[in-house]
Image (cartoon, rainbow, N blue to C red):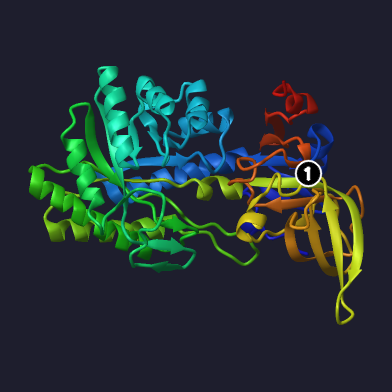
Amino acid sequence: MAFAPEIFSENSKFDSHLSIAGVSAEALIQEFGSPLFVVDESDFKARALTFKTALDKHFGNQAGSVYYASKAFLNKEIARWIESVGIGIDVASGGELAVALAVNFPPERIQVHGNNKSEAEIEKAIVAGVGAIVIDSFHEIERVARIAAAHEKIQNVFIRVTPGIEAHTHEFIATAHEDVKFGFSLASGSAWKAIEEIEALKSLKLVGLHSHIGSQIFDALGFGVAAERVISLLAKFRDHYSDELPELDLGGGYGVAYLPGEESVNIDSVLAQLSSIVIRECASVGIRVPRISIEPGRAIAAPTTTTLYTVGTTKSIELDGGDTRRYIAVDGGFTDNMRPALYDAKYHAILANRLSSSHDVLSRIVGKHCESGDIIIRDIQLPQDIVPGDILAVPVTGAYGRQMASNYNHLTRPAVIAVIDGKARLIVRRETEADLLALDI
């Protein structure tokens, strides 16, 4: 087991023990309890600013907005950080919108997503004055138009376009990937029909197109193919309406490293390539380059956060062939990190509270739930002398860990701590059993 700095937050260090922004893992557990989400505050803000700087650098006057994808990780303090950096935020539910509005996030920098927005959510967004609502279905065209008209407003909207691209990790498939719940198909013509319906309504103003092609993407190839296809729709709009849509949102999905030896996306390189593609394609169809916006969520949040667990029990199991596997059970599980169970996602872990001289053995980190699938890391080499009371640290858990957390088995969800310059503070308190009982009648 070795400390791999490339997958820990920028201000994490290991010198006989793990410290994050100058605070030891052991001190954090002693003060705030276990398990615990620990966010490196300055790293979070720096990553958000990196995306804004790269977008401005490569698109200049045509740089649109960086929208932080709040589904990755959101609470009121995170929303304050996003606002302070000067970028926007996208929300996909009334609850996420409520968090942003609770800290007076500028509504004009909020973009509203979701494939099944309720009328109450739509009305809340329109009344708040959000910058744009991303239309995802024909039903939503009617609903947003009707509610905006009732409030005597003209609502800015995007159309979410399905460009026939599916991209994940290093690969993408550029065929007819239309069998998804999101957006309007470019290939079938429903995207153009949606444009025609919106243009006929006085209470809606179409301000751009939106596409999102996948997750864990490390190069510009998939984004480039999607951009080419959506730009052709921008050209068709210009030809038909003698006008040009001002913005193109190319979504997110930028990849991050989860395991030692992996590398996160080089956003400067990807946006440089994407800029060249967009400029070339716009020139080929004779339209101006629109404002280009992006939506990094995981790539900002994931590497900034480490989950700390306390070991509860250990045991060794003899495997076929004479090998053994050591089971290490911690005080959390798939209620605070659902991704291994959902997606077979891979994570790394280290012994955080001390330096071990013991040899490593094949280990499996499991949670405390009544499910055999409650596995955080299926196979990892960890010191043989790990015992109850030791602290394990799992990095790159800032995206979807706390956000997907549940109360299965009536476990309380962990606290979230921000650390910066040797100081730690609570930004989301730990749930209590009283919280769990509060909704029961």
In the image: residue 151, left or right of residue 193: right
Residue 133 occupies quadrant: top left
* Residue 22 visible in this rendered orientation of the protein: no
> Can you give x and y, in whole percent of width and height, for residue 285 in the image?
13, 58
Q: Is residue 203 above or below residue 151?
A: below
Quarter the C terminus occupies: top right
Q: Regarding mark 1 in the picture, which secondary structure is present there?
A: helix
In the rendered view, would you say 228 is above or below 156?
A: below
Q: Residue at x 43, y 24 (%)?
A: 120
Residue at position x 40%, y 60% in the image: 269
The residue drawn where x is 91% and y is 53% is 313
Relative placement, left or right, of 361 versus 53 is right
Q: Look at the image and tell me in which quarter the N terminus lies.
A: bottom right
Residue under circle 1?
A: 25
Q: Residue furthest front?
A: 441
Residue ID at (43%, 37%): 90
Q: Picture coordinates of residue 372 (x, y %)? A: 78, 57
**Mark 1 residue crowding within 10 angstroms, few (<14) / some (14–19) / many (20+):** many
Taking depth in this image into account, of 145 and 392 the one nearest to the observer is 145
Three-letter residue code for mark 1: Ala
Percent position of residue 296, x then y? 45, 47
Q: Taking the image as drawn, is residue 305 in sight?
A: yes
